[in-house]
Amino acid sequence: MDSDVQRPFLSREDTDDAEEHINNRQSFKYVRPVERRSFLKTVKQNITDHFKFVGAGIIAAVSYFDPGNWGTDLAAGSQYGYSLLGVVLLASLGAILYQILSCRLGIVTGLDLAQHIRLQLHNREKNPMIWRWMVLYPLYVLAEFSLVATDLSELLGSAIALNLIFPFMPLWVGVSLTALDVLIILAMYNPSGSSRSMHIFEGIIGVMTIAVFASFAVLVIKVHPEWSEVMRGFLPNKLAFEPGATYISIGIIGATIMPHSMFLGSKLATADRLASASSVNSSRTSSNEDRFSLSNIEETSRNPLEYVAKAMKQDPDYEPSPRIGDADVYEGGPGRLPSILKHLKHGSWDIALSLLTIAVPVNAAILIVASATFFNNPNRDSEGVADLFDAHDLILKYIGKPFAFVFAFALLCAGQSASITATQASQAVSEGFINWKSPPILRRLITRLLGILPSLIIAVIAGRSGVDQLLNASQVVLSIMLPFAIGPLIYLSGREDVMRVWNPTDEGQSTSTTNLLDPSRLGPSHAHRRRQSENVTIDGGYQQFQLADQLQLNTTGQWVDLRPSKYILIISWIIFVGLCLSNGFVVVQVCRGKEI
């Protein structure tokens, strides 16, 4: 019988060796075979996934060809030909770098740049009042000042566009009419909101962006530039450091790398673009931060006064759309880390592709059109720096009336699309820095009124030349304000305790995500326990944010370091230092009364 069969005797050492051998064999049991898919299926899946993330990059691109860019690019092309195309390219590459950093900050932490600055400075352990009044609030004032300068350029650009389309309209009337763009915000403002509204808003901005891109594609084809000279212009040129060109180069940098786009980019990145309706808690009313919708235009027209009063009130039940950081790794989902990695990949590509294929070509096209029609035009009647009026008149004279209208229409679309995105940025700044939650319509009125007053005065007194100078000066101001936005951004992006994500590894949690990561990014294993009574609050200070982040954990796992590479951070700091030095040079030269 089997029971009578004598089994071989195993010593304790043999038993331990056998168990170790079995365990080693069983360790392969949890590795799932990789599903082999054809190349076309892989490409199709990646494209399908990427479409969920398209939108934030387009909105970011809008900031890089607003009317301020038009003014500085036209001045550069008309006075220096194609020589400053290299400045446009370098500024655009720097913009891509900082925009991706702001995107990463929002994705990894679930908080935007303004909120992080408040967490760092509001409740410091030592001398909190000094940190607030000497650092936090001055940074907030500078951010608001840059928003006013941004809105000023959108206002002037839109006013000039209206004057070009309707020549009978005085410039000061166009400036006044731009205040009415708050009605666009009002007509699309939905107090109840829906998660779909974010995509509607991005779609509207996308249509305006395509209109600007198509308009300049037509203009570039029509002016027949010297393409060999264009290619040579993208190479670095010492002309950028000559008197006169330096001021315009600084203006190009300020017009390209916009401070408000850093705040807006990090804010948009916090939205969870993979969340489905079923996965969102039913107690929350999901909507985007500014609650745009086309469904209430009819309601606005029927009851305008009642709707204005409703829009001016902050909805007490309003909560923004689900953030990436809201995902619970133990409830209804595969975990936060896989979602963040997917958002990082597609979000970064969305920004890079949008800026490379839209913002860079449009900015280069503006300078190319100015150079071909002004700098290299022997039939031009006068010399000097071209402004938006000169460009329109020359296009009208040598290319034709339809193309002049295309130029003016593209300028109007650029001004309005950038104006709407500036409203979102101002919302993020006020909520993040001082926790002031206000309706977008109110924010729009405040920033627009601050920009209209100086514009009206200059439009009435100095006319078109004064308006053009004010437009270029606003871009130089933005360049000077820029270090106060990108400095904190680089600092936060380089902090390990900020740019890290908890990855649970026990109780059946999948380790497939961890296996895809660089081992150098994985920290030692830890065990934490959750205490449901603890909450994360902005006002609690940065230390409480980190503590609450750890209290969310109730099992063994690892911290995953998602900071950018040290080379990216070094390059970012080098650009930052160079920008500070160039801004300091401009300020010193202006104070000395010398030409720059």
Image (cartoon, rainbow, N blue to C red):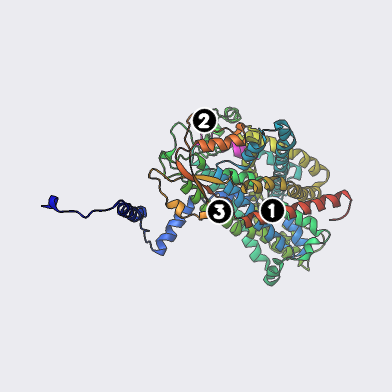
Residue 86, above or below 309: below
Amino acid identity at mark 1: Trp
Residue 389 can be seen, yes or no:
no
Whole-number angstrom distance, CA of label 3 to CA of label 2 = 33 Å
**x 79%, y 64%: residue:** 239
* Magenta-highlighted residues: 181-193
20 lies left or right of 343 = left
> Circle 1 sits on which residue?
573
| Label 3: how many Cα within 10 Å (few below 14, some 14–19, many 20+) | many
Residue 348: mark in rendering: 3
From the image, tell me which residue sits under label 2: 534
- Provide the secondary structure element on which disc 2 rests: loop
Residue 66 coordinates in the image, percent (x, y): 67, 50
Q: Earlier in the sequence, mark 3 or mark 1?
A: 3
Residue 453 vs 559, above or below: the answer is: above
Quick one: label 2 or label 1, which is nearer the N terminus?
Answer: 2
Considering only vertical position in the picture, is 220 above or below 48?
below
Judged from the image, the secondary structure of the residue bearing numbered disc 3 is helix
Question: How many angstroms separate mark 2 from mark 1 (CA)?
Answer: 37 Å
Percent across and percent down for residue 12 are 30, 51
Q: CA distance from mark 3 to mark 1?
A: 20 Å
- Judge by depth and name the residue closer to the eye, 408 or 189: 189
Front position among marks 3 and 2: 2
Q: Amino acid at mark 3?
A: Ser
